[in-house]
Amino acid sequence: MPMSSIKEGKKFVLIGAQSWAFGPAGKASAVAHSFQKLGLRTCFVGSSTSLDLCKNSGHFDDLIEVSSAYDYLNLQEGNFSAVVSVMDPYLAVWAKNRNLPLYYIDSMSWFWNWEDKSIAEDFIGNIEKKKLADSFKCLDAFEPDTRQLVAHQISQLVFSQGNPQTVPVTEKKSKNIGSVIDLSYRENIIDRDTVVISLSGGISPVNSIESAVRYANMIVDLVLEERSLDFFSAKRFVITGHPEVIKKVNKPNKVGVEFVSLSHPDFLRVLNRAVVVFVPCGFTTIYEALAYRVPVAFLPENHNGHVYEYLIITDGLVDREDIFPNTLFTLSSSSLDYIRPIDDSMNLIDIYTKEYLNNTYCRENYRQKIDNIFRLLSDRDGVLKRQTEAIMKLIPDFEGADRIARNLVANLL
């Protein structure tokens, strides 16, 4: 089938992303842009933060808003030629039920606890006998880790950022695809003049708008100091995040400080001008920043995955904090040998956030850490080189989104 016949046909590649801050949606947007360049029509299905990011990206031919996974029951499979799910196991089960080609993207497969595989295996063994609504009810009762295992096992291919965790049935179909980011907006700008503070999506299933705003207020207090722009020889701070968070965060009246909720393409364009990016330790923004030749410095975590992502990227590094400087709250008490339950992690983060806002000694301690990061980044190019070398031990390159698109086109044709 020639490429043009896919483009001119009525069917779309359906892409969905777990509604969890900006990470999954950022990958969905990047892959859709890669499909777009190859002539495939795409449709995004999702809700909340994920829907907003993908809608504003301009990379999709159509969008479907859902209020919950149970709205997938009303999707008409005849409109779609294949499904790409970014960490959304419900969409994966829908695709399996509808006998559509299913491709799964998971940037955190190492994170899941798959010691007990029997529940997932029993579910998959009976999936064809169940009504879809009943299958969704079973997923509701599973731990998040088990849902992800189900999705991996029923997918035709699984694309992972980094070496994937596998079980016997997924060993041959799981690939370290590289970083799933959009490289289309890269420019060679020599005179960089912007310090970027990314608050990430902020709002997620474990973060309310209230906690996201409280976190944002803490970050503004922590990083925005009078001398900061002079230190980096920059002209402006750009503080970006979820539009509702940006609307409500305390905004100091300082020259050269911009609070703005950027679309994903606009965020990438700003990276071309960035001297450094202060960001929670999430894979998507780490890969985007380094691909756009910007060093990263890590803010305190705002969900339980951030500290473990830090432990992954620094595993085996000597002087890790000189390579990836950070202000993570729970790093000293965290280990890859034991990943805390999400409720425990979120409670700890909430305690630390409130302590920072209410305790002068705590604030001074973390401001001292920021001072140390500023000094380290006086060798900006050296830090960038060391960070890039460390990350390239985990992935083959930054071109995962284009590689996924080519894989899917090859399979469709």
Image: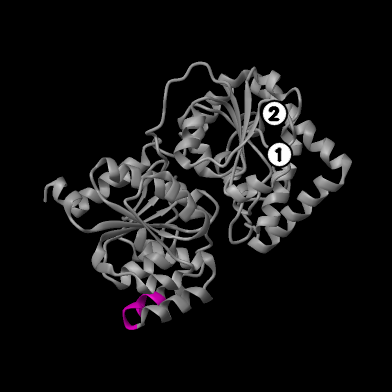
Q: Position of residue 326 (x, y in %)?
A: 67, 37
- Magenta stretch holds residue 128: yes
Say whether residue 133 is left or right of residue 5: right
Say which residue appears at 86% left-offset and 47% top-offset. Answer: 358
Q: Nearer the viewer, residue 257 or 286?
A: 257
Q: Which residue appears farthest toward the right when viewing the image?
A: 360
Q: Is residue 297 visible?
A: yes
Element type where label 1 sits in the image: loop
Q: Considering the whole magenta stretch, tell me its main secondary structure.
A: helix
Q: Nearer the viewer, residue 355 or 46?
A: 46
Q: Amino acid at mark 2?
A: Ile
Residue position marked by numbered label 2 in the rendering: 373
Q: Nearer the viewer, residue 138 or 194?
A: 194
Say which residue appears at 74% left-offset and 55% top-offset. Answer: 350
Q: Position of residue 23 (x, y in %)?
A: 50, 49
Q: Which residue appears farthest toward the left when viewing the image?
A: 1
Q: Position of residue 18 (x, y in %)?
A: 47, 59
The answer to whether the residue labelled 2 contacts the one labelled 1, judged by CB atoms less than 8 Å apart, is: yes
Q: Which residues are magenta?
A: 123-129
Q: Amino acid at mark 1?
A: Thr
Q: Position of residue 120 (x, y in %)?
A: 44, 72
Quadrant of the image occupied by residue 188 = top left
Residue position marked by numbered label 1 in the rendering: 327
